[in-house]
Image (cartoon, helix red, strand yellow):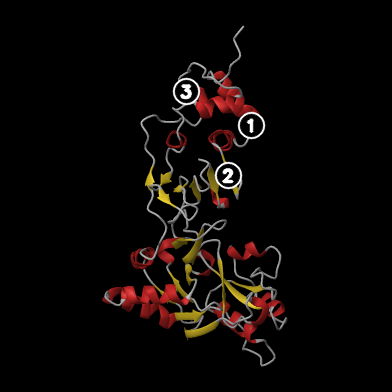
Amino acid sequence: MVVAPRSMSQTPACQVALAALEAGLSVLPIKPDGSKQPAVSGWKNYQQFCPSVEEVETWFRHPHRGLAVVTGYVSGGLVALDFDDPKTFEAWRKLIRCNAGLQALYEFLAEGYEEKTPKGGRHILFRCPEAFQKERRPGNQKLALRPVPPPQRFETLVETREEGGLIIIDPSRGAVHPNGKPYVRLRGSVSTIRTISAVEREQLYASLKTLDEAPELVKVEPARVFQSRPGSWTPRVSVPGERPGDLFMADPINTWESLLVGWDISEPALNAAGYLERYLRHPGKAGPGPNCTLNADGTDRLFCFSPSVGLPMGRYFTKFEFFAYWFWGGDIAAAVRALVEQGYTTRKKG
């Protein structure tokens, strides 16, 4: 794309945005209100195509707007590594010093584009077109997490911005970030972003995943496979109790392991509240780290703290509630009927 020469009347953000556009990057203006949100409606269209020069010049007439680049296929397979804080970045630097190949790869990428974030972390931008030629392009990934007290459960140490993502860059400053500090480019520019292979990308990610502090999870493979629809269960005799859900939970055959087939689960570990807690990751989740816990409050309930699971976030679930939401989409009445059909009732037939 041919971009008109920079004008002295253009804001610094506009000048960098035009340079990025010329380098084949899709760009967006960011609101100067600490929200880190794009300042244009329908911004996801620019995940499919780059804006025009005229659009960019119009967007960045506002002197306080920040600048973001759209990651993924539209920007030539652009990837952004986001280190949340300086300690995490320095821990990784120390780790790779004993690996000449990784150290050389870091230097190569940093010379292309490295910046300091308002929190003291780092952004490293690079391209990996090879990874974005597949039918399923890689989305944003959390590469390393650290457990923290409720309700957040985990904080992100290192993550990527890939297909569907964006990353705020220099010269964004002022109210663009909640703490009011600037993004500061340290090396390279939007015109010198480096390109690496898919193999090098995976080597890089593998080194970053070693910083992950989340508990190790193993896939649940119980002896009794819980089917996706209770209609295939073997009917059983009713057990004492009242409501079908109560009867279901009172039946010792219905363990959490029987409900969580295909999930990844950690060994129990004593939490800060003094309870044996386990961490869970739902089937199909990309990247490391759990998104649910068991028994965090000592009541043998599942707690969901991530929207990606498909369960209502920020609440606890009994076994019956989990059964109703996970297998019946939250239709309590349908879940109850299914349990009654399988013998979880005190009513006599006839």
What secondary structure is found at the residue carrying circle 1? helix
Alpha carbon of mark 3 to alpha carbon of mark 2: how far? 26 Å
User: What residue type is disc 3 on?
Assistant: Trp
Residue 157 in view (yes/no): yes
Q: Quadrant of the N terminus?
A: bottom right
Task: Please say if 60 is above or below 289.
Answer: below
Horizontal and vertical percent position of residue 320:
56, 33
Q: Quadrant of the C terminus?
A: top right
What secondary structure is found at the residue carrying circle 3? loop
Q: Earlier in the sequence, mark 3 or mark 2?
A: 3
Considering depth in this image, is 69 or 92 the residue closer to the camera? 92
Task: Please say if 206 is above or below 126.
Answer: above
| Residue designated by label 1 | 332
User: What residue type is disc 1 on?
Assistant: Ile
* Image-based side of 174 in relation to 143, left or right: right
- In which quarter of the view is residue 172 placed? bottom right
Q: Earlier in the sequence, mark 1 or mark 2?
A: 2
* Image-based side of 245 in relation to 7, left or right: left
Q: Residues within 10 Å of mark 2 (few under 14, many from 20)?
A: many
Residue 1 in view (yes/no): no
Q: Nearer the viewer, mark 1 or mark 2?
A: 2
Residue 233 is labelled as 3
Horizontal and vertical percent position of residue 286:
45, 53
* Image-based side of 109 in relation to 331, left or right: left
User: What residue type is disc 2 on?
Assistant: Tyr
Residue drawn at point x = 55 percent, y = 64 percent: 165
The answer to whether the residues at label 1 and label 2 have Cβ atoms under 8 Å apart is no
Horizontal and vertical percent position of residue 281:
46, 48
Alpha carbon of mark 1 to alpha carbon of mark 2: how far? 16 Å
| Residue designated by label 2 | 316
| Residue most extreme to the top | 350
